[in-house]
C-alpha cells in the first residue's frame, strides 16, 4: 500500500513539473508577442453594388451598418460602393443608386488604422442614365472601449429607415445627394452626442450626369 501511494505521488509530481514547464513556455511566448498583436487585428467590410440596364431599368440599394470593434492594435475598414448604368437608351430612363453608411467604433492609444472609402458611378454606353454612388464612413476612436448605448442605436436605426425611404423615393440623383448629405450630418451629430470623442467622416459621392 505504501509503495502504491508513493508511486501515485511521484506521478503527480511529474505532471506538475510538466505543467510548470508548459506554463513557463506559454509565458515566454506571450512576452515575445508584440503588443500590437496581443491587442488584436480587426476588419470591417461593406460593399454595395447596383446595375441598371434594359432588363432592370431601376436598381436601388443601400446599406447602413454599425461595426463596434472594441480594443484593437490594428484595423482595416473598407466601405466600397459602385453604381452602374449599362446599355440603356435615351427613352429607357435607367436609374442606378447605391448608398452605404458605415459606422466604425474602435479603441486604443496607438491604433494602426487603414480606412478605405470609395464611391464610383459608371456609365457604360448608357444614354440618359442617372447613376449615384455615395459612400459615407464614420470612424469613432476612443482611448478605451465603449459601446453605443440603446438610445444611440435607436436613433441611428431611425436614420437607417429614412435612408431606405430615400432610396425608394424616386427623386433625381442630384436631390438624393443633398438628402444623403443631410442624413450624414445627422449621423455625425448622434455619434458626437453619444461620446465626447472625435468623429472622422469620409465622404465620397460620384454621379452621372456629373453633379
Image (spheres, rainbow, N blue to C red):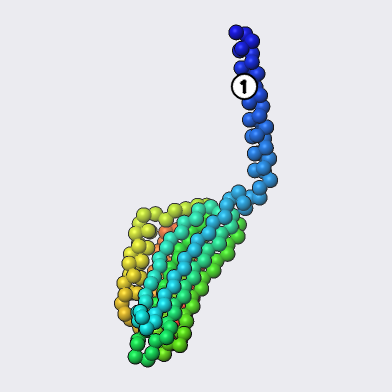
Name the secondary structure under disc 1. Answer: helix
Q: Nearer the viewer, residue 24 or 158?
A: 24
Answer whether residue 181 is visible to the viewer in this image.
no
Residue placed furthest toward the top: 1
**Is disc 1 surrounded by few (<14), some (14 to 19) or many (20+) residues within 10 Å?**
few
Query: Residue 29's x, y, as percent?
Result: 67, 42
* Numbered disc total: 1
User: 65 and 128: which one is in front?
Assistant: 128
- Above or below 188: residue 52: below
Depth check: give the residue in front, 124 or 132.
124
Q: Quadrant of the C terminus?
A: bottom left
Residue in the foreground of this view, choosing between 35 and 167:
167
Does residue 155 lie above or below 23 as drawn? below
Residue 176 lies, in percent from the top left, at 37, 79
Residue 119 is situated, as x and y percent measured from the top left of the image, at 48, 75
Q: Which residue is mark 1?
A: 12
Residue at the (50%, 61%) spot, across then down: 44
* Residue 149 image offset from top left, x and y in percent: 39, 54
* Quadrant position of residue 41: bottom right
Q: Quadrant of residue 52?
A: bottom left
Q: Is residue 7 visible?
A: yes
Which corner quadrant holds the N terminus?
Answer: top right
Q: Residue at x 31, y 80 (%)?
A: 170
Amino acid at each position: 500500500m505504501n509503495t502504491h501511494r508513493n508511486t501515485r505521488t511521484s506521478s503527480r509530481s511529474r505532471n506538475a513539473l510538466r505543467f510548470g514547464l508548459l506554463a513557463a513556455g506559454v509565458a515566454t511566448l506571450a512576452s515575445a508577442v508584440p503588443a500590437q498583436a496581443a491587442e488584436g487585428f480587426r476588419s470591417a467590410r461593406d460593399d454595395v453594388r447596383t446595375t441598371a440596364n434594359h432588363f432592370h431599368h431601376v436598381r436601388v440599394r443601400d446599406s447602413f451598418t454599425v461595426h463596434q470593434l472594441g480594443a484593437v492594435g490594428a484595423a482595416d475598414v473598407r466601405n466600397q460602393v459602385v453604381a452602374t448604368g449599362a446599355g440603356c437608351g435615351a427613352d429607357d430612363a435607367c436609374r442606378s443608386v447605391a448608398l452605404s453608411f458605415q459606422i466604425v467604433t474602435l479603441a486604443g492609444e496607438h491604433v494602426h488604422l487603414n480606412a478605405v472609402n470609395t464611391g464610383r458611378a459608371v456609365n457604360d454606353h448608357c444614354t440618359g442614365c442617372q447613376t449615384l454612388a455615395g459612400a459615407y464612413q464614420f470612424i469613432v476612436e476612443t482611448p478605451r472601449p465603449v459601446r453605443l448605448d440603446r438610445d444611440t442605436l435607436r436613433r441611428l436605426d431611425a436614420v437607417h429607415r429614412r435612408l431606405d425611404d430615400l432610396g425608394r423615393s424616386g427623386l433625381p440623383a442630384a436631390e438624393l445627394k443633398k438628402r444623403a448629405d443631410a442624413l450624414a450630418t445627422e449621423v455625425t451629430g448622434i455619434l458626437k452626442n453619444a461620446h465626447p470623442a472625435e468623429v472622422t467622416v469620409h465622404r465620397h459621392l460620384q454621379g452621372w450626369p456629373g453633379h
